[in-house]
Image: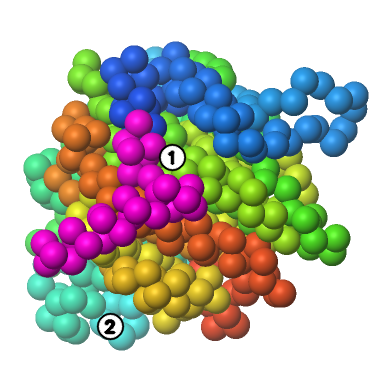
Amino acid sequence: MSIRIGLAAGALATLHLCGQDPDPARLRKDVYALADPAMEGRATGTAGQRKAAAYLAQRFLDAGLVPLVSQEGPPCAPSFLLPYTLLRSRQDAAASTFQLGHTMLKVGEDILTARAQAATGEVVFVGYGIHAPELKWDDAAGLEPKGCWLAMWEGAPESPGTGASKDWATAGQAETKLEWARKAGAAGCLFIQTRPDTEAGFGRMRLYLSRSVERGQLSLKGGAVRESQTFWLSAEAAKALRIELKADPKPGGSRALGTFVYTPKITKEEIPASNLAGLIPGTDLKLKDEIIVLSAHHDHVGMEGGKLHPGADDNASGTAAILEVARLLKDSKPKRSILVLSLSGEEIGLWGSQAFVAAPPVELSRIKADINLDMVGRNALDEVCVTPAQVDGAVGTLTQEARAIALRQGLKLTTEADQYWYRSDHFTFARRGIPAIFFFGGMHADYHQPSDTPDKINYEKLARVVGLAKELVLNVANATEPPKLLPKETWSTWTWPSPTSPALKPR
Ligand SMILES: [Zn+2]
C-alpha cells in the first residue's frame, strides 16, 4: 500500500508542474486559512463568517471567476457576494402561555414545542393514535379528525398480544402517527409522555426542543415559515388534564378534551448573511446559458460552548476543493457555464442554498445540475462516499458518470452516504427537481468538535476528490445532453425529515 501511495504522490508532484492537476499545497493553504482562529469557526452571520466570505471573494477573483451581475435595474458594482437575511424567532417560554380547557400548562416544562406562531383548535384524545388494521389496533375508529388537534400517548402499548414487535415499534413512532394525522386532515399532534425523561421519546424531545428553542427558529426574511405542528405534553400535564394511562389499554375510545390556545412570546432578530457565486462562462453558442453548479458550504458552527470549532473538514475541505477546481478550469472554455457557489447557513438548516433557490441570481430553469462537496478531506485515501447511490434504488446519470470517472482515477465510490442525503446543500437543489450529486469523505469522531483541525486533513485525498469533481463538472458542462433524473427516481420530491427522524443532523 505504501508503494502505491508513494507512486501516486510522486505522480501528482510531477504533474503539478504543468498546472493542470490538483495541488495539495494550495488546498492546504486554503483549509488552514479558513480554519484559522481569526475566522472564529465561521458561524453564519458572525464577523468570522464575514471574514471568511471576504477571503473567498479574493480567491474567486484570483481564480478568474466572473461575478454575476444583477439582470434587473441599473448595473451595480459586480460582486461575488449574494446577500440574504435570515429571521430568528425565539420563544420566551416563561412569557408564553398554553391553556387547554380550563387547565393552564407551563410552556417549556409541562408542554414543549418549537412552534413560534400562535395556535388554537379543538383537541381530541385518541389513545395511542395508532391506526394499524394489520395489528388489529385502530384508535381512529369512529373518529372525524379533520381540522382537529390529536392528543395521543407517545410510543405503543407494551404487550398488546398481536403482531410482531417490530411492527409495533413502527406503529409507535411519532413519524408514523404524524403521517396518519396529516393524511386524515388533522391540524397537528400533541404527544403525551409515557416514559421517564431519561429514555427515548419525551426525554429525547425535551433535549431536542430545548436546544431548538435556544437556537430559535430560522426562516428567510419575507419567506414562508415551516411551523411545527407538534406539541409534547409531560406526564404531569396528563395528570392535570385527567388523562390516565391504563395498564391494559384498548384501542378506540376517543374523547374531546376541549379547546387549546397557545400564545407564544416571540422575539425576532435579523441575521445578515451571504453566499458567494462566481462564473466560468460557457463558450458554446447554444449551451452557454445552461449552468452547472459546483457547491460547498463555507460556514461552520462557530464558538460553541466558548470553544473554537475550526471546521477544517466540515467544510473548509469542500470549500478549498471548489476553489481548486475553479483555478484548474479557469481556461477550460466549457460549453455550458459553471457556477462556483460557496454557501453559508448550511449548519443551521441549509439556509444559504434555500436563499439561493428562493431568489436565484439566474433563472432556476437554467441550472442543470448541482455537484456538492461536504467534508471531503478525511478517512481512506482512495475512497469517497457518493449519494444518491442506492436510496430507493435510485441512481441518476450524474452518479453513473461519477462512477466511470472514479474508476478511471482509481477511486472507490462507496454508497453509505445515502443516509446523509438530506444533510447538505445538494438536497435543496434536488427538491427543486435539479439533478444533484453529493461527495462526502465519510464520518469521523471529530465531526462538529473543536478537534476538527486542519492538521488532520489528508491533502492528497482532498486533491483526489478535486480531480474527481473537476472531471465530473467539466464532462457534464461539455456533454451533449444535461444530466437526467432516471424515471424511477422519487428523491426529488422527498420531504424534510421530522425532528424525531434518525436522519436528522446531530448537533
Ligand atoms: Zn458540512
* Quadrant position of residue 418: bottom left
Report if residue 246 is visible in the image. yes
Taking the spot 70% from the left edge, 74% from the top edge, the residue there is 481
- In terms of secondary structure, what is the magenta stretch mainly? helix
Residue 319: image tag: 1
Label 2 secondary element: loop
Report the residue that reaches farthest toward the right. 74
Report if residue 206 is visible in the image. no
Q: Amino acid at mark 2?
A: Lys
Q: Of 78 and 152, which appears nearest the observer?
A: 78
Label 1 packing within 10 angstroms: few (<14), some (14-19), many (20+): many
Q: Say left or right for 232 vs 468.
A: left
Label 1 secondary element: helix
Rendering coords of residue 338 (x, y %): 65, 51
Taking the spot 23% from the left edge, 77% from the top edge, the residue there is 167
* Quadrant position of residue 289: bottom right
Q: What residue is shown with label 2?
A: 136
Quadrant of the image containing the C terminus: top left
Task: Write down the region rendered in magenta.
Answer: 1-29
* Ligand 1 within 8 Å, label 1 CB: no
Taking the spot 47% from the left edge, 50% from the top edge, the residue there is 18
